[in-house]
Amino acid sequence: MSIQVRNISKSFGSFHALEKVSLTIPDGELVALLGPSGSGKTTLLRIIAGLEEPDNADGDAAVLFSGQDVLHRPAGQRQVGFVFQHYALFRHMSVLENIAFGLRVRPRKTRPPEAEIRRRAAELLGLVQLEGLGHRLPSELSGGQRQRVALARALAVEPGVLLLDEPFGALDARVRRDLRSWLRRLHDDLKVTSVFVTHDQEEALEVADRIVVMNKGKIEQIGTPEEIFHHPASEFVMRFIGQVNLFHGRVEGGRGQFGPLVVDAQAQVAPSSRASAAGHNARLLVRPHQWLVSVRDDIPLSIPAQVARVQSAGPAVRLELRDGQGETIHAEISHERAAELRLAPQSRVYLTPRETRVFVDEYAI
Amino acid sequence: MSHTSSQRKSPATRDPLWLRILLPTVSIGFIFLFLLLPLLAVFAEALRKGLGVYFASFTEPDAWSAIKLTLLTAGVSVAANLVFGLAAAWAIAKHRFFGRSVLITLIDLPFAISPVISGLIFVLMFGLQGWFGPWLRDHNLHVIFATPGIILATVFITFPFVARQLIPLMEAQGDEQEQAALTLGASGWTTFWRITLPGAKWALLHGVILCNARAMGEFGAVSVVSGHIRGMTNTIPLHVEILYNEYNFTAAFAVASLLALLAIVTLAAKGAVEWRLNRIRQETLAQEIPS
């Protein structure tokens, strides 16, 4: 089922969790709602599920599944599977009973016979790779196993839409990584439209077909992981997805001056800021891996810096540098390049940005 | 873990020997003197004239009628407070509504007022001179100095027990399980019976045990509304008082030993249920805190 959300607003007291949010999710996609805490992502998910009602439910708000308005349907009749952050497993029921719950509570007319319920529950138990643990209580399982039971329970009702609230939030880093690639494979097999909430950008980039970046109750950008990473639509998105180096400066007459860096503003300014890109305060952002690090100063537009720390435990070498003003700059280079340059603390180097983005203040005086 | 028991405390953190002997001696002595000795005295007095007299004290018609009235009162009170307490706890723990904090405070009201005053409230309401007195008299209904009054007063006195036990557990468990049940298509009714109630059953039982003990043992409030009519409106505690005032000590202690037995059974049952409840609380905590 495709999901369409229109003009959703929701406040809790004076806090605006969502402001006129609209979003379309095509059938069969795996979408991440990504944002910091308080950005409204969980509220949006809960409104899609029917666990929360938008303030303008009787106004222009709409939630459509495959074109059908479901906003006024209770959660139980929306055909959604919901996976809670803390699993919300039924503590007094065995794993199998947890999974079978959604089938057992159906009205007699649509309830499958007992044998069929058991068969389906056992089948789902296999799908989430927990064969043999069906008779355990949730308290006898590990966090990762509980999360998979929660997923099996949600899938048992054959949902048209699968909604997951911070599905890996309560797990430790290793289990988390295993589970998210497993979730990706599971989605490729089942192809059920899925939306998951996360505040972990790495998780969103790795798992999702499409990412919805949210901030302060609004959607900042919708795009594939590549688009979000390489073409951030706003400064917020760029700073939220991965590390950045920030330079304050001004844009004037097609030229941007940011401390030691001078750039051709016309080409660098992000599309959304371009209209007002004259005579304004602005910020230049450079990702750590976009620095060209050299020991020679013959490259134009480079800034001198001194190495403060070399951290080579990892897939790339991470450098912490200080520029002329003593500001910290982060850079990332390959191990080969680092060996070639023979970098050590106190080494003097020159940094040239290969790619930058400029964001101009919207209200400059 | 086993290694904690084998770990010896360093001498620096150990209390001096005299203190380690004195403190347990004082507390055990206190328990013996103020709790155990009176309990033993009850049974000793009750059995002083032999088992024959002991059992005859129960089969005597007035005593038997007091026992029956007490069982009826406790039965109705527990059943009523089971329903009220569950409803109140469910409303308070799982919902946010206007007046919620007032309701939480009101639940404790019966604990705060003297039982005698609680009894008086009902006399003022249902007695002949009370608000509903003339109406009740015209319809030939008896509340005060009759069984309904005793039950009303007992229900009032024992109201907090079930709700007080349920609210903390239900609040700790939150409403995520209920939400999960709703998204899986369960109705509100099904969710209550299959999720909320089984999750709270041990706390519920705990409340029922305490509620029952108090309902059977309540004296003050019942004394005010009962009228002490022998064989009619006397509960066990009131009957004990009458026997004692008549210098019929053996019978008084024999009947009192019933209440003492009830207390022992209550303590044992309470202990068993609390053991289960602690495990549930720990599981609740373990599931909330990420590993």
Image: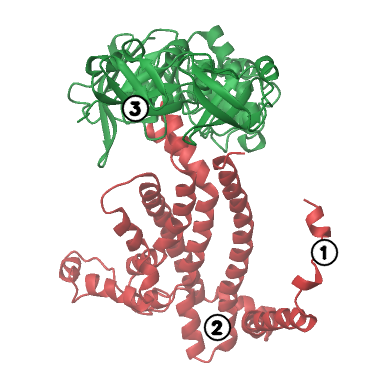
Chain colours: A green, B red
Do the residues marked 3 and 1 share a common chain? no
Where is residue B46? Give x, y as percent. 63, 82
Residue B55's tag is none
The residue at which mark 3 appears reads as A249
Where is residue B56? Give x, y as percent. 60, 77
Secondary structure of the residue carrying numbered label 2: helix
Instruction: Please say if the residues under marks 2 and 1 sit with CB atoms less than 8 Å apart.
Output: no
Label count reads: 3
The residue at which mark 2 appears reads as B252
Residue B8's tag is 1
Instruction: Please say if the residues under marks 3 and 2 sit with CB atoms less than 8 Å apart.
Output: no
Where is residue B105? Give x, y as percent. 34, 62
Question: Which amino acid, by three-letter code, is at mark 2?
Answer: Ala
Secondary structure of the residue carrying numbered label 3: strand
Residue appearing at x 24%, y 65% in the figure: B141
Q: What chain does mark 1 sit on? A: B
Residue appearing at x 48%, y 90% in the figure: B245
- Left or right of A128 on screen, residue A59: left
Quarter of the image with the C terminus of chain B is: top right
Do the residues marked 3 and 2 share a common chain? no
Residue appearing at x 30%, y 25% in the figure: A250
Secondary structure of the residue carrying numbered label 1: loop
